Image (cartoon, grey):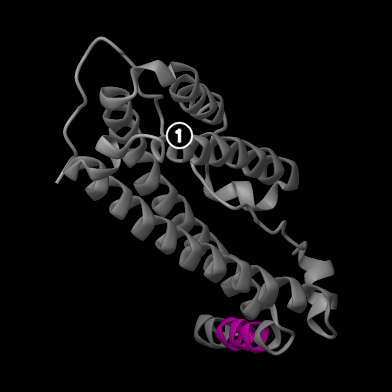
């Protein structure tokens, strides 16, 4: 057999294999995994955006309510603990890591909620232009987080349905595609470093 025919047969075998994988749902499962990773990246990006606002919010509140050091410190400490969790695309394949991440974000979200509740007791703070701008940015970011999280949830649902539905469940079993953990939490993401809270300094201005 000539080398030409050998190459032709190899090419035909490759095409047949590709068609077979497509027909059994392999490509859909593989694309589903990539969609999940992309959706997860957007979720973490939006959490990062929100987290970047928190240091300025903390500094602004302390400028008007230095006596609320306990509440302010709890926000910082919760975020510091959350930074110990490494966020990566592969986290979507680790249910325990996802659960730890979600728990950490709930803690940060609870601390931030208490901080904003305390701010309600300070009319001058509520009327401050910097604080109003920061809270408006925070509200917009929370909306973005919700949208990104919903997209991630839908991507997970579609993929998980394929993993357990016939005939793609057979392909999933053969090639090791497994169901992935959902991510459901009211709030939050942690930044790489916790902000420094210095109650002796004036409030930091908001970033444009």
Q: Quadrant of the N terminus?
A: bottom right
Indicate the position of residue 27 as horizontal and vertical percent values. 62, 78
Q: Which residue is at the front of the view, 203 or 44?
A: 203
Residue under the image location 84 percent in, 68 percent down: 173
Magenta stretch: includes residue 196? no
Is residue 16 among the parts visible in the rendering? Answer: yes
- The magenta stretch is 9-19
Q: Residues within 10 Å of mark 1 (few under 14, many from 20)?
A: some
Relative to residue 46, is residue 78 drawn left or right?
right
- The residue lying at 61 percent from left, 42 percent from top is 106
In which image quadrant can residue 199 be found?
top left
Instruction: Specify the principal SS of the magenta part.
Output: helix
Left or right: 182 as drawn, with respect to 56: right
Q: Residue at image x 79%, y 75%? A: 171
* Residue beneath the point at 39% across and 36% down: 119
Left or right for 13, reference 129: right
**Closest to the observer, 19 or 48:** 48
Per the image, the residue denoted by label 1 is: 118
Residue 44 on image: x %, y %: 46, 50
Between 160 and 114, the one lying in front of the other is 114
- The answer to whether any part of residue 196 appears in the image is no
Q: Position of residue 134 (x, y in %)?
A: 27, 46
Secondary structure of the residue carrying numbered label 1 = helix
16 drawn magenta:
yes
Q: 185 above or below 5? A: above
Give how far across and how far down residue 169 sits, in percent: 83, 76
Q: Is residue 28 above or below residue 74?
A: below
Q: Is residue 19 left or right of residue 128?
A: right
Q: Quadrant of residue 184?
A: bottom right
Establish if 182 lies above or below 19. above
């Amino acid at each position: 057999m000539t080398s030409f025919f050998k190459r032709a047969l190899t090419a035909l075998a490759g095409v047949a294999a590709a068609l077979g994988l497509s027909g059994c749902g392999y490509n859909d499962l593989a694309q589903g995994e990539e969609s999940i990773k992309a959706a997860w990246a957007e979720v973490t990006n939006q959490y990062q955006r929100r987290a970047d606002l928190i240091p300025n919010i903390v500094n602004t509140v302390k400028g008007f309510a230095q006596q609320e050091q306990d509440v302010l410190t709890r926000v910082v400490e919760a975020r510091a603990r959350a930074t110990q969790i490494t966020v990566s695309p592969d986290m979507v394949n680790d249910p325990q890591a996802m659960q730890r991440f979600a728990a950490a974000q709930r803690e940060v979200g609870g601390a931030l909620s208490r901080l904003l509740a305390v701010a309600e007791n300070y009319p001058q703070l509520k009327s401050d232009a910097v604080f109003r701008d920061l809270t408006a940015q925070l509200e917009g970011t929370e909306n973005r987080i919700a949208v990104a999280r919903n997209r991630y949830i839908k991507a997970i649902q579609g993929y998980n349905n394929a993993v357990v539905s016939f005939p793609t469940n057979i392909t999933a079993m053969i090639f090791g595609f497994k169901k992935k953990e959902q991510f459901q939490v009211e709030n939050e993401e942690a930044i790489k470093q916790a902000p420094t809270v210095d109650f002796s300094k004036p409030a930091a201005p908001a970033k444009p």
